[in-house]
Image (cartoon, grey):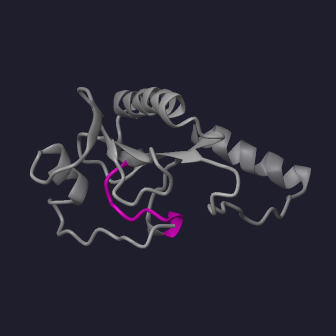
Amino acid sequence: MPEFVDTSPSGSCLFCRLVAGEIPSAQVFEDEHTLAFMDIGQVNPGHVLVASKRHAATLLELTGEEAGAVMQTAQRVARAVQACFAPDGIMLLQANGAAAGQTVQHFHIHVVPRHADDGIHFTWPRPSPAPDVLAGYAERLRTAL
């Protein structure tokens, strides 16, 4: 994950300041709910961040309309990345909370062009719980929904 962590005081996060035009960015796209701009820490050429315009720290704080708008913009940007940079693949990365690797406490999705052997490693352990354990998890989630 990136080394950068936004330490801006509450109420003036880095992305809110970008949305307000208080600090410069290399903007790619903007609409009513989203702003897409180049990540200053380009993992690969064409690495774009798509952020909600309204401050929401995580996915859980977005409205359904905002969440849909961010994903639509991410898809639009991914198509442009594919056309311009011809990557072998495209990774969307979205983290919620420090434990998940979120470094700027404003909802955003990374659109990252990927190439074979580009040095990005994305793995996790796979404990493979028993089917009855998975069924129990699913039941808990169905109840919550």
Q: Identify which residue is drawn at 21% across, 59% down.
A: 13
As for residue 59 lying within the magenta part, the answer is: no
Residue 50 is drawn in which quadrant? top left
Q: Is residue 58 shown above or below 84?
A: below
Query: Foreground residue, 128 or 133?
Result: 128
Q: Identify which residue is drawn at 82% across, 46% down.
A: 135
99 with respect to 103 (left or right): right
Query: Foreground residue, 52 or 89?
Result: 89
Instruction: Residue 34: tell me if it is visible.
Output: no
Magenta stretch? Answer: 99-107
Q: Is residue 130 shown above or below 27?
A: below
Image coordinates of residue 33 in percent, x first then y, are 27, 31
Query: Foreground residue, 74 or 136?
Result: 74
Q: Specify the principal SS of the magenta part.
A: loop
Q: Identify which residue is drawn at 35% across, 40% down.
A: 62
Image coordinates of residue 63 in percent, x first then y, are 35, 34
